[in-house]
Image (cartoon, rainbow, N blue to C red):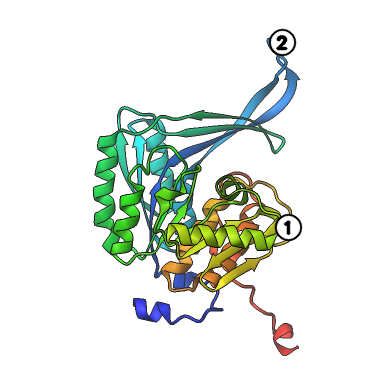
Amino acid sequence: MNKAARNAIAPDAGYSHERASTGRVLVVGDVMLDRYWFGAVERISPEAPVPVVRVERSEERPGGAANVARNAAALGARTRLLCVVGDDEAGVALERLLSAEHVHADMHRDPTISTTVKLRVISRQQQLMRIDFETLPSHEVLAAKLAAFEEALPESDVVILSDYAKGGLAHIERMIASARAAGKPVLVDPKGDDYDRYRGATLLTPNRNEFRQVAGSWSDDAALADKAQRMRAELGLEALLVTRSEEGMTLFDADGMHHQPTHAREVYDVSGAGDTVIATIGVMLACGTPLPEAMRVANRAAGIVVGKLGTAVVHPEELAPPVASPEQERS
């Protein structure tokens, strides 16, 4: 399907795996390896007042921008990931995991750093501790990644920049400018309080706390809309999406405010929910879906993924609209 045909999709088309497979998504950002140690707590340590966890099994999953990429790939998009990792065992593990999930990972190895690892210790479905291992990548490796980014742009429909403040997006201003000059939509999951570096992006997707940190508190939806639209104008954004946890998510664009209430379901783990949101929107935009409809689908995806443990993905059969039974069709 060519680009003109994709753009002709009706606003209420929703998600379909067939359409998603026409999209090409380029993800760039901070990757990490999420490790999980699961075990039982049966006693307190005699050395200190802390629980002793007897580890029974372990799991590894791609995290950060790598989780964004695996979410996009799981929905069917042709997904390429540009990132920096260490020349170490964790980097090899991350490459293996991404390959198994059909992500084309272009990993720039920096022998001076260790791949970012987040180790979570879990007992009885409760996280007891998280241990982080991380160092910032070198300038030389980041420069090489920038060159690879420019080469990858012509073969991409949408660019997602996933910022976890680990140093992998030191050249984000140039990346945004290059992508926009090439006519590619740029979606940014921001971090920190310097949003000026995201100037000119198509869409920014802060969560409620991240937006409050930059824009200040608000008393009602009208005040939120005023702050969001002011930020959108100041940064030259086409749209701003604020994910609001139990309040759903709200999109602000030139047409005003579009709100999606949260889907009522038990929240099990919010880890990586923002990754799922921006990945889903990226896939939908890549296959020609208008942004308000892309947000609606992403809201459904977020409602599914928070019911899973740790960084997880949403699969096509979970996201596709249910097929009506013959009885329903006759009624």
Question: Which quadrant of the figure has residue 119?
Answer: top right
What separation in Å lies between label 2 and label 1 (alpha carbons)?
A: 41 Å
| Residue furthest to the top | 47
Is 102 displayed left or right of 11 in the figure? left
Tell me the amino acid under the disc marked 2.
Pro
- Using the image, determine if residue 299 lies above or below residue 166: below
Numbered mark located on residue 265 in the image: 1
- Say few, some or many: other residues with alpha carbon within 10 Å of mark 2 (under 14 / 14 to 19 / 20 or more): few
Q: Quadrant of the C terminus?
A: bottom right
Labels 2 and 1: the sequence-earlier one: 2
Q: Is residue 100 visible?
A: no
Is 153 displayed left or right of 199 in the figure? left
Q: In front: 137, or 231?
A: 231
Q: Position of residue 68 (x, y in %)?
A: 47, 52
Is 186 displayed left or right of 318 in the figure? left
Rendered residue at 52%/52% (across/down): 275
- Using the image, determine if residue 2 lies above or below residue 135: below
- Say few, some or many: other residues with alpha carbon within 10 Å of mark 1 (under 14 / 14 to 19 / 20 or more): few
